[in-house]
Image (tube, rainbow, N blue to C red):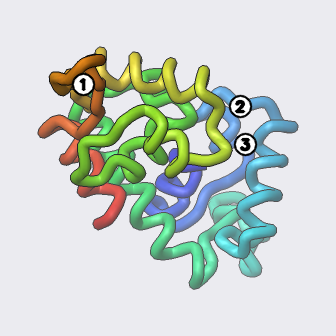
Amino acid sequence: MVPIMALLSREKGARFAAMANRFALSRHSLARTLGQLRDWGWVAPNPGHGHPLRPEYVLTDSGLPVGGVCDRIMAERERMGLEPAQLPRWSLPLIAGIGGDWLRFGDLRDRLDPVTPRALSLTLQQMVGQDLVGRRLEPGFAMVPRYGLTDRGSDLAAALTG
Protein backbone atom coordinates (compact mmCIF):
# COMPACT_ATOMS: atom_id res chain seq x y z
CA MET A 1 0.00 0.00 0.00
CA VAL A 2 2.86 2.40 0.74
CA PRO A 3 4.14 2.54 -2.86
CA ILE A 4 0.61 3.01 -4.21
CA MET A 5 -0.19 5.82 -1.77
CA ALA A 6 3.17 7.45 -2.54
CA LEU A 7 2.51 7.31 -6.27
CA LEU A 8 -0.98 8.78 -5.88
CA SER A 9 0.46 11.56 -3.73
CA ARG A 10 3.41 12.35 -5.99
CA GLU A 11 1.49 12.26 -9.27
CA LYS A 12 -1.84 13.59 -7.97
CA GLY A 13 -3.57 10.40 -9.03
CA ALA A 14 -3.00 7.43 -11.31
CA ARG A 15 -4.69 5.08 -13.72
CA PHE A 16 -5.38 1.47 -12.74
CA ALA A 17 -3.42 -0.08 -15.63
CA ALA A 18 -0.43 2.20 -15.01
CA MET A 19 -0.30 1.18 -11.33
CA ALA A 20 -0.63 -2.52 -12.17
CA ASN A 21 2.23 -2.29 -14.66
CA ARG A 22 4.48 -0.11 -12.52
CA PHE A 23 4.25 -2.36 -9.47
CA ALA A 24 3.92 -5.67 -11.38
CA LEU A 25 0.64 -6.44 -9.59
CA SER A 26 -2.15 -8.67 -10.79
CA ARG A 27 -5.46 -6.96 -11.47
CA HIS A 28 -6.97 -8.84 -8.53
CA SER A 29 -4.25 -7.75 -6.05
CA LEU A 30 -4.42 -4.12 -7.11
CA ALA A 31 -8.23 -4.11 -7.01
CA ARG A 32 -8.15 -5.56 -3.46
CA THR A 33 -5.57 -3.01 -2.33
CA LEU A 34 -7.47 -0.08 -3.84
CA GLY A 35 -10.68 -1.47 -2.31
CA GLN A 36 -9.09 -1.47 1.13
CA LEU A 37 -7.74 2.05 0.63
CA ARG A 38 -11.24 3.17 -0.45
CA ASP A 39 -12.77 1.50 2.62
CA TRP A 40 -10.37 3.45 4.83
CA GLY A 41 -11.40 6.63 3.02
CA TRP A 42 -7.93 7.45 1.66
CA VAL A 43 -8.53 6.83 -2.06
CA ALA A 44 -11.53 7.55 -4.28
CA PRO A 45 -12.36 7.14 -7.94
CA ASN A 46 -11.68 10.41 -9.73
CA PRO A 47 -15.01 12.22 -10.12
CA GLY A 48 -13.65 13.99 -13.21
CA HIS A 49 -12.52 10.75 -14.89
CA GLY A 50 -13.48 10.33 -18.52
CA HIS A 51 -10.61 11.74 -20.49
CA PRO A 52 -7.96 9.14 -21.38
CA LEU A 53 -5.19 11.12 -19.65
CA ARG A 54 -7.04 11.81 -16.39
CA PRO A 55 -6.22 9.56 -13.43
CA GLU A 56 -8.83 7.00 -12.42
CA TYR A 57 -7.91 7.14 -8.71
CA VAL A 58 -7.00 10.11 -6.51
CA LEU A 59 -6.34 10.68 -2.83
CA THR A 60 -9.18 11.98 -0.70
CA ASP A 61 -8.75 14.86 1.74
CA SER A 62 -8.09 12.34 4.55
CA GLY A 63 -5.70 10.41 2.29
CA LEU A 64 -3.50 13.41 1.47
CA PRO A 65 -1.51 13.37 4.74
CA VAL A 66 -1.12 9.58 4.56
CA GLY A 67 0.06 9.87 0.97
CA GLY A 68 2.60 12.49 2.01
CA VAL A 69 4.04 10.18 4.67
CA CYS A 70 4.17 7.30 2.18
CA ASP A 71 5.96 9.53 -0.32
CA ARG A 72 8.57 10.46 2.32
CA ILE A 73 9.05 6.78 3.22
CA MET A 74 9.56 5.83 -0.42
CA ALA A 75 11.97 8.73 -1.02
CA GLU A 76 14.05 7.72 2.03
CA ARG A 77 14.00 4.06 0.96
CA GLU A 78 15.27 5.03 -2.48
CA ARG A 79 17.92 7.35 -0.97
CA MET A 80 19.17 4.47 1.17
CA GLY A 81 19.25 2.13 -1.82
CA LEU A 82 16.76 -0.30 -0.30
CA GLU A 83 14.72 -2.42 -2.68
CA PRO A 84 11.07 -3.08 -1.78
CA ALA A 85 11.87 -6.72 -0.92
CA GLN A 86 14.42 -5.50 1.63
CA LEU A 87 11.64 -4.03 3.74
CA PRO A 88 9.43 -6.96 4.72
CA ARG A 89 5.87 -6.60 5.98
CA TRP A 90 6.77 -5.87 9.61
CA SER A 91 9.77 -3.60 8.94
CA LEU A 92 7.99 -0.24 9.14
CA PRO A 93 5.92 -1.18 12.21
CA LEU A 94 9.14 -2.49 13.79
CA ILE A 95 10.98 0.77 13.16
CA ALA A 96 8.07 2.77 14.54
CA GLY A 97 7.74 0.38 17.51
CA ILE A 98 11.37 0.63 18.52
CA GLY A 99 11.41 4.42 18.42
CA GLY A 100 14.37 5.70 20.43
CA ASP A 101 14.43 2.76 22.84
CA TRP A 102 16.60 -0.35 23.14
CA LEU A 103 14.08 -3.15 23.68
CA ARG A 104 14.07 -6.85 24.42
CA PHE A 105 12.45 -9.26 21.99
CA GLY A 106 9.40 -9.78 24.22
CA ASP A 107 8.85 -6.03 24.58
CA LEU A 108 8.96 -5.65 20.81
CA ARG A 109 6.53 -8.54 20.37
CA ASP A 110 4.12 -6.88 22.82
CA ARG A 111 4.37 -3.52 21.02
CA LEU A 112 3.75 -5.12 17.63
CA ASP A 113 0.90 -7.42 18.58
CA PRO A 114 -0.33 -9.47 16.56
CA VAL A 115 3.13 -10.19 15.05
CA THR A 116 4.20 -13.81 15.45
CA PRO A 117 7.54 -14.56 17.10
CA ARG A 118 8.81 -16.09 13.85
CA ALA A 119 7.85 -13.05 11.76
CA LEU A 120 9.45 -10.72 14.29
CA SER A 121 12.62 -12.81 14.45
CA LEU A 122 12.97 -12.93 10.66
CA THR A 123 12.29 -9.21 10.34
CA LEU A 124 14.84 -8.40 13.05
CA GLN A 125 17.48 -10.54 11.33
CA GLN A 126 16.87 -8.83 8.02
CA MET A 127 16.84 -5.35 9.55
CA VAL A 128 20.07 -6.00 11.50
CA GLY A 129 21.65 -7.25 8.26
CA GLN A 130 20.70 -4.00 6.50
CA ASP A 131 22.08 -1.89 9.35
CA LEU A 132 18.66 -0.42 10.15
CA VAL A 133 18.42 -2.07 13.57
CA GLY A 134 21.28 -2.71 15.96
CA ARG A 135 21.58 -5.63 18.36
CA ARG A 136 23.56 -5.39 21.56
CA LEU A 137 24.05 -7.85 24.39
CA GLU A 138 23.73 -6.59 27.93
CA PRO A 139 25.82 -8.38 30.52
CA GLY A 140 24.24 -10.43 33.23
CA PHE A 141 23.85 -14.02 34.33
CA ALA A 142 22.25 -14.63 30.96
CA MET A 143 23.21 -12.19 28.23
CA VAL A 144 20.16 -10.14 27.26
CA PRO A 145 19.89 -8.99 23.65
CA ARG A 146 18.30 -5.61 23.04
CA TYR A 147 17.36 -4.03 19.75
CA GLY A 148 17.48 -0.36 18.80
CA LEU A 149 17.63 1.81 15.71
CA THR A 150 20.93 2.58 14.02
CA ASP A 151 21.56 5.96 12.40
CA ARG A 152 20.19 4.57 9.13
CA GLY A 153 17.13 3.23 10.94
CA SER A 154 16.62 6.59 12.62
CA ASP A 155 16.60 8.26 9.20
CA LEU A 156 13.83 5.91 8.06
CA ALA A 157 11.95 6.47 11.35
CA ALA A 158 12.13 10.23 10.73
CA ALA A 159 10.41 9.70 7.37
CA LEU A 160 7.60 7.85 9.19
CA THR A 161 6.95 10.68 11.60
CA GLY A 162 7.53 13.51 9.16
Q: Identify the residue shown where x is 30% and y is 53%.
A: 99
Q: Amino acid at mark 1?
A: Arg
User: Could you tell me which residue is drawn at 32 percent across and 38 percent down?
Assistant: 77
Farthest-out residue, front: 141
- In-front residue for pair 127/143: 143
Nearest to the observer: residue 21 or residue 40: 40
Tell me the crowding category of disc 1: few under 14, some 14 to 19, or many 20 or more residues within 10 angstroms, Cα based.
some
Q: Sequence-wise, which precedes: disc 3 or disc 2?
A: 3
Residue 60 pos. (x, y %): 63, 78
Q: Is residue 60 left or right of residue 150?
A: right
Between the residue at mark 3 and the residue at mark 2, the CA separation in whole angstroms equals 10 Å
User: Cβ–Cβ below 8 Å for labels 2 and 1?
Assistant: no
Residue where numbered disc 3 is placed = 17
- The residue that mark 1 highlights is 135
142 sits to left or right of 85: left
Residue 69 picture location, percent across and down: 40, 62
Q: Position of residue 36 (x, y in %)?
A: 78, 58
* Residue that label 2 marks: 25
Q: Amino acid at mark 2?
A: Leu
